[in-house]
Image (cartoon, rainbow, N blue to C red):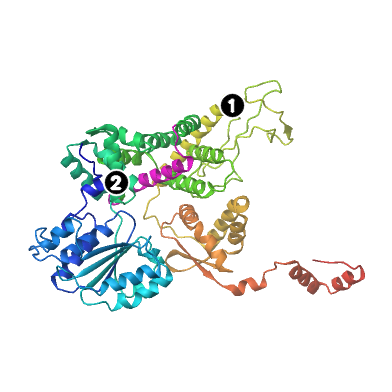
């Protein structure tokens, strides 16, 4: 029975041309051979499985080859190449620094360096995992590495360059190997499958490439594992079952559930994922990646960032057309917050389920950043007719401002609704979960209708509308903005109330602020209120600029001491009174 050789060894590149994904490094090494500009030491660094040791072996064999080909590749026919291919070369030495990391090991290496090669021009020493050497071993290696004999060449390889002493780095030519791209790994696996007579699903190969995370050796190991599982033909389903990869289908269905505010099916889908043995944190990161892939699928120029198969890419493009950008922004923020809090959470399942509920609630919330006037908008209150009545009734809403978007509030607890000049106490309503779901659905429909009406109104604004306005109109509008933010953001309320802008040339409004913190607060909501004032003043060319004048804040009263000093200046007897009565104003 023939011994089985894993694909990572059987199809290990033997020439520069067969190295995958490192074209810039192989081209540089070939040019160095061509121009006879070989350094005394090289450092190959990068993640695992990207070809560091492979390129070191190819480079060592090539510079010792006696009959180089026209494209500067080893001939594999001379005595030096045959000895290397048969693992009997005395000119190319490989040292594992993980197990030979002491000073004595380096001293033995230094003694070997003095011996000239038997065949070929150079004695090449390949030191793998060189970062494992001790500090003393590094120091013992310094002099030889800097000034070795003319026949000695060193090729160091490591996955952790930051652990190597700077004195070692300064004596080497450093080559940083890149992670393998998904398309490079897929192409290599397709060629391998063709040579082995294996019928492989392209989508399955793509999953293998993504699972390998840029490492070709890992991808080849996964490939062998799948072939052992399914034989000469494997499908996408075989790959995800064997490698325990979460199917794309779950993420596509979950996004549809989020769009429809379907909490029940979202929680059931998550429970099914857990029942199949998937880690909840892995699910959260996968959902974040899926939302990111939908985001990059919104534009043709960023579609190239999507590292999936052709069929899956079409599904992403289709779903990207159905999902709005504000939804994606909010969803990514929610999933990222869950990812950050997962490690510290005591009830991890509840944390993820809460994330799913919040994602389902996005579609029923107001996504526009335009400020809404909540003070003048009536609310929808569930008010039962009698204490024994189980079904709530939704009181009709009176729209007082047709140009402003209505915000609905559903209250199940006892509420006080002002219908006349005398307040009336409403009894507690016994509302079932089924009734609440119906009410939530009605609320979502009404809010969606309001959003559509607002969008339709925005599209009617003419881009070149440019009406003049006065300083008095600006002051009135700033008073409205202050009222808008009074309950939502008191800090913005104070800024708008005390910083009425002045009109400059070309419809520029200049606001004078007290400090940079106020400037940052204005910048956070600039787009929202700028759109609002353009609509209110019927001028699309309005621009708002800010100017920080810290001298303004000197006259502002903040602390209790400032208040006392201010009042004492108004009446000097106040200080006498505090002393007589032994009062403390702090």
Residue 286 magenta: yes
**Residue 450 image point, x, y percent:** 48, 38
Considering the numbered disc 1 on the image, is that residue within a helix, a strand or a loop?
helix
Task: Tell which of 189 and 328 is nearer to you.
Answer: 189
Q: Nearer the viewer, residue 388 or 567?
A: 388
Expressed as whole percent of the image width and height from the top left, the position of residue 509 reads 49, 65
Residue placed under numbered mark 1 in the picture: 433
* Of labels 2 and 1, the one closer to you: 2
The tally of labels here is 2
Q: Magenta segment, principal secondary structure?
A: helix
Query: Going by the image, does 36 lie left or right of 525?
Result: left
Q: Is 59 inside the magenta-drawn segment?
A: no
Residue at image x 36%, y 60%? 159
Residue stretch in magenta: 276-304
| Residue at 50% over, 29% down | 264
282 in relation to 249, above or below: below
Q: Quadrant of the C terminus?
A: bottom right
Residue 518 visible in the shown view:
yes
| SS under mark 2 | helix
Measuring from the top left, give residue 462's x and y in whole percent. Answer: 38, 51
Q: CA distance from mark 2 to mark 1?
A: 50 Å
Q: To which quarter of the image does residue 248 belong?
A: top left
Q: Are marks 2 and 1 in contact (CB under 8 Å)?
A: no
Question: Hey, which residue is sitting farthest right in the picture?
Answer: 580
Residue 414 x %, y %: 70, 33
Dot 2 or dot 1, earlier in sequence: 2
């Amino acid at each position: 029975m023939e011994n089985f050789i894993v694909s990572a060894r059987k199809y290990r590149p033997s020439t520069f041309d067969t190295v995958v994904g490192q074209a810039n490094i192989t081209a540089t090494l070939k040019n160095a051979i061509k121009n006879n500009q070989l350094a005394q030491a090289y450092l190959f660094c990068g993640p695992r499985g990207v070809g560091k040791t492979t390129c070191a072996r190819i480079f060592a064999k090539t510079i010792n080859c006696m009959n180089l080909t026209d494209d500067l590749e080893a001939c594999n026919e001379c005595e030096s190449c045959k000895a290397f291919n048969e693992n009997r070369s005395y000119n190319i030495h490989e040292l594992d620094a993980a197990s030979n990391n002491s000073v004595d090991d380096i001293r033995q290496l230094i003694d070997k360096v003095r011996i000239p090669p038997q065949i070929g021009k150079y004695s090449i020493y390949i030191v793998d995992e060189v970062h494992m050497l001790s500090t003393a071993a590094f120091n013992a290696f310094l002099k030889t590495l800097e000034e070795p004999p003319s026949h000695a060449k060193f090729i160091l390889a490591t996955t952790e360059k930051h652990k190597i002493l700077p004195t070692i780095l300064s004596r080497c030519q450093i080559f940083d190997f890149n992670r393998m791209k998904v398309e490079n790994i897929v192409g290599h696996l397709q060629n391998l499958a063709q040579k082995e007579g294996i019928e492989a699903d392209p989508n399955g190969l793509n999953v293998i490439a993504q699972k390998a995370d840029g490492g070709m050796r890992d991808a080849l190991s996964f490939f062998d594992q799948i072939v052992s599982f399914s034989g000469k033909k494997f499908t996408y389903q075989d790959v995800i079952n064997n490698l325990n990869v979460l199917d794309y289908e779950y993420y596509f269905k979950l996004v549809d559930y989020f769009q429809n505010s379907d909490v029940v099916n979202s929680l059931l889908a998550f429970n099914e994922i857990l029942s199949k043995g998937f880690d909840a944190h892995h699910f959260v990161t996968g959902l974040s990646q899926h939302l990111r892939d939908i985001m990059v699928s919104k534009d043709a120029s960023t579609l190239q960032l999507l590292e999936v198969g052709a069929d899956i890419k079409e599904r992403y493009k289709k779903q990207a057309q159905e999902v709005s950008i504000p939804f994606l922004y909010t969803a990514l923020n929610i999933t990222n917050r869950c990812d950050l809090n997962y490690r510290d959470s005591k009830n991890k399942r509840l944390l993820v389920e809460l994330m799913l509920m919040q994602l389902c609630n996005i579609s029923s919330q107001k996504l526009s950043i335009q400020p809404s006037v909540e003070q003048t908008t009536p609310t929808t209150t569930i008010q039962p007719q009698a204490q024994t009545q189980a079904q709530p009734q939704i009181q009709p809403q009176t729209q007082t401002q047709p140009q402003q978007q209505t915000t609905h509030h559903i209250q199940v607890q006892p509420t006080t609704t002002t219908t006349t000049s005398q307040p009336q106490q409403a009894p507690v309503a016994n509302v079932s979960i089924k009734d609440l779901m119906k009410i939530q659905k009605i609320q979502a429909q009404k809010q969606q209708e309001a959003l559509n009406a607002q969008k339709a109104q925005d599209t009617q604004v003419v881009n070149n509308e440019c009406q003049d306005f006065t300083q008095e109109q600006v002051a009135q509008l700033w008073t409205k903005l202050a009222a808008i933010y009074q309950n939502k953001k008191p800090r913005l309320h104070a800024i708008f109330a005390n910083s009425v802008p002045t009109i400059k040339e070309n419809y520029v409004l200049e606001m004078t602020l007290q400090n940079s913190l106020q400037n940052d607060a204005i910048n956070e909501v600039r787009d929202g209120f700028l759109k609002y004032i353009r609509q209110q003043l019927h001028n699309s060319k309005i621009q708002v600029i800010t100017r920080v004048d810290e001298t303004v804040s000197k006259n502002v009263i903040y602390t209790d001491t400032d208040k006392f000093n201010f009042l004492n200046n108004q009446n000097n007897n106040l200080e006498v009174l505090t002393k007589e009565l032994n009062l403390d104003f702090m």
